Image (spheres, helix red, strand yellow):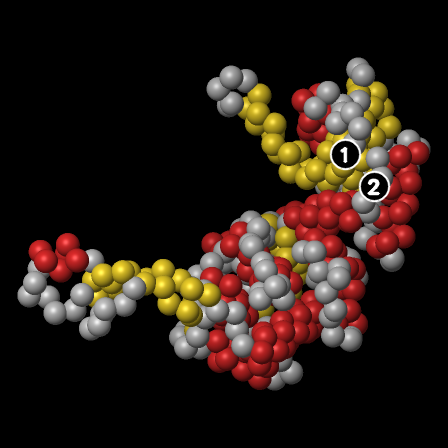
Amino acid sequence: MMIWQNYGSQILIDEPSFKNSKQWCLTAKGWVGHIPLTRELEIVLMPKVEISNIFGMLEYAYRLKSFKFLDGITASDSLEEFYETLAKFFAHRVLDRGRKGFFRSYQPRKDRIPYIRGRFDVRRSCQKPWEVKPDCQYEEHTSDVEDNQILAWTLRRILQSGMCTERSLPQVRRAYQSLQGLATPIPCNPHDCIGRLYNRLNQDYQPMHALCRFFLEQSGPSHRIGDRTMIPFLVDMPQLYELFVAEWLKAQKLTDFVVKSHEEVVIGQEGRINFNIDLVIYEKETQQARFVLDTKYKAPAHPGNDDINQVVTYATTKDCHEAVLIYPKPLNLDERIGKIRVRSLTFSLDGDLEKAGSKFLEKLFSGEDR
């Protein structure tokens, strides 16, 4: 019941019947990770992808490719160890920044204080002369800013996860304690970690916020067990695969092409029909859409009609003649629907990701069927 109530989006439950020999059957819906149910029982959704390749996807998806990680992090042989090693590394980065001094900035404040500071509200003071403390508007140089609040909230969520052992808990606790009294752990979401402004004083926060985004995105719904809250660690593999392929393509810096992800197309005057296209590759000179691509993290026997209909519709809206479905496993599709050529290509997650990407790119532009 707890799985069905809290994790119905991540796990499919089949009740005992003659179809399954009177057994309960649990099937992961494309998610991997760790779900604590009670103090004694937990569910681990094992990935079919190598742990090192999940890390490789993470490097691109969260733009951490140029970020120097501690040695041995890619050698993790379980998802729990991967999470814990990443958490430990994140804590080290926070502690390093704490030794240098956390970022501070001037923040506007409005308060009644026992002395005049900044701008004094004369009108209000004249209206209420019996109030001794004046109303003042001023700026305070403080470390309790959103940059640090995001770090504090993420560390708190990691401590609640239940996935850290004594190998990493001391570092994570110290990192969290280093921010106590300096930054309030205000609840935030992954979107708060994106599109932030950085300067020479807080440039090193950018990769830390990228890690915060990962931890916050992969923290699933929480439920209470006794006197503590357990936060599961769940990775949405379809989302990670889609983000990885998009960022990998952008990182290639194609000479004659521009890669754009999540392009929104609105149809009709009232805008009732809209599409969000995974990837569009444009010719740089003409701005014409050369390829429309849709990423699918699944391995069916052959592409389904729904997938084909979707990508062909996307290509039609962009007046593009090349529609491509991307799968992690080889499938056989190369057909023409009117003026649109629709085919399947593979960006494999087995073995070396860079070699798999190069092979995918070669097939994309050579026009060969996989």
Kindly indicate the quadrant of the structure image that contains residue 207. bottom right
User: Which quadrant: the C terminus?
Assistant: top right
Quarter of the figure with residue 31: bottom right
Marks 2/1: CA–CA distance? 10 Å
Coordinates of residue 93 in the picture (x, y in percent): 63, 74
Q: Residues within 10 Å of mark 1 (few under 14, many from 20)?
A: many
**Which numbered disc covers residue 11?**
none
Foreground pick, 226 / 63: 63
Residue sitting at x 69%, y 48%: 243
Looking at the image, is 149 positioned above or below residue 326? below
135 relative to 72 in the view: left or right? left
Which residue does the numbered mark 1 point to in the structure image?
281
Q: Position of residue 121 (x, y in %)?
A: 20, 58
Q: Amino acid at mark 2?
A: Leu
Q: Nearer the viewer, residue 211 or 47?
A: 211
Q: Nearer the viewer, residue 280 or 367?
A: 280
Residue at the (74%, 74%) spot, across then down: 70
Q: Residue at x 12, y 69 (%)?
A: 132
SS for tag 1?
Answer: strand
Is residue 171 something that shows in the picture?
A: yes
Which badge, 2 or 1, comes first in the chain's sequence?
2
* Residue occupying the point 9% across, 56% down: 127
Relative height, residue 97 to residue 79 (above, below): below
Q: Which mark is residue 254?
A: 2
Query: Relative to residue 48, is residue 309 depicted above or below?
Result: above
